[in-house]
Image (spheres, helix red, strand yellow):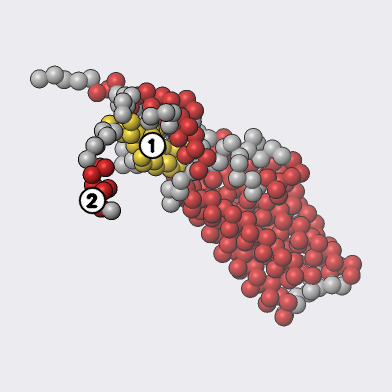
Amino acid sequence: MHHHRLEEWQHDHTFGQDQKRSGETRTLIVVGLTLVMMVWEILAGILYGSMALLADGLHMGSHAVALGIAVFAYAYARKNAGNVQFSFGTGKVNALGGFAGAILLAGFALYMVIESIDRFIHPVAISFDGAIIVAVIGLIVNGVSAWILGGEDHGHGHNHGHDAHDHHHGHHDHNRRAAYFHVLADALTSVLAIAALLAGKYAGWNWMDPIMGIVGAVLITRWSWHLLKDTSRVLLDQQRSDLEEDVRHAIENGDARISDLHLWSIGPNIHAAIVSVVSHDPETPGVYKRRIQARCPSLVHVTIETQRCIDAPETDTEVRLAS
């Protein structure tokens, strides 16, 4: 009885998920900064009677929790990278973290709308000067956080609003993207809080405060929706049409045809594929695999099934009988 050396054909399913990601340390720093600023803004909001500042602080609090989820997802994905119970590694933990963060973001946007309507009906007296100073410091902290998280993914300077929705980034780390959105949303509510406080102080427009709360909530909901769409696409294994096209080009030349193709994401910018190839004279699966991976480097796990196509002469007779 022959004992084959299976080790030559076996491979692990960590796909680099066990390595510490640049996003993890950065996110941890931002969580610390956010927590400190959150406590300060909430206390100042109560002290100065500013609902805008209190809402901004609570907003930061919700994001501190969301960012905490992101850090946990990084650590969990790394710790379990070699766990065989995860069929394709732990890459999807990042998408799950992003999804949970986006839901928190949507929930807080709803809270902001309710709170803003209440403030509109029952206005509150505000100590403007102190509140404005704290709100400005909050905005500076958001700016520093955005810069820390930005790095190579979002190093587009002033053009963040547009780039955040660009679905053609070379590298999609949903966790870091979620954290980045939280910081952007925080910066936005800080700007709106400052604008509302200045309008209240210099023009007596106290109604600006709740209006800005509603505007902020609408924009945050929009960001949250984009993130939910992107992360749910990964969690539900939706096909990537551009990758599908590349795989077909790599395989279908002349005689060979793909009869069945499954493509899905198993982590940030890493994918898996199951490909059924039909041909009169099929190559070995290894040949097809090398062709696909040469064209699609993000496909780290490829399974090939080959079928030999045999022309059946009786098919003509069956067609005639059927007609």
Q: Would residue 59 be found to the left or right of residue 96 on screen? A: right
At 76% from the left edge and 61% from the top edge, which residue is drawn?
192
Label of residue 321 in the image: 2
Q: Which residue is mark 1?
A: 258
Q: Where does residue 154 sit, x and y in percent of width and height?
A: 66, 40
Query: Residue flagged by tag 2: what amino acid is it?
Result: Leu
Name the quadrant containing residue 310: top left
Which numbered disc, 2 or 1, marks the residue closer to the eye?
A: 2
Query: Residue flagged by tag 1: what amino acid is it?
Result: Ile
Seen from this angle, which residue lies furthest right? 202
At 43% from the left edge and 51% from the top edge, which residue is drawn?
236
At 24% from the left edge and 37% from the top edge, which residue is drawn?
312
Q: Where does residue 303 sit, x and y in percent of width and height?
A: 34, 33
Q: Earlier in the sequence, mark 2 or mark 1?
A: 1
Q: Where does residue 54 sit, x and y in percent of width and height?
A: 69, 65
Q: Secondary structure at mark 1?
A: strand
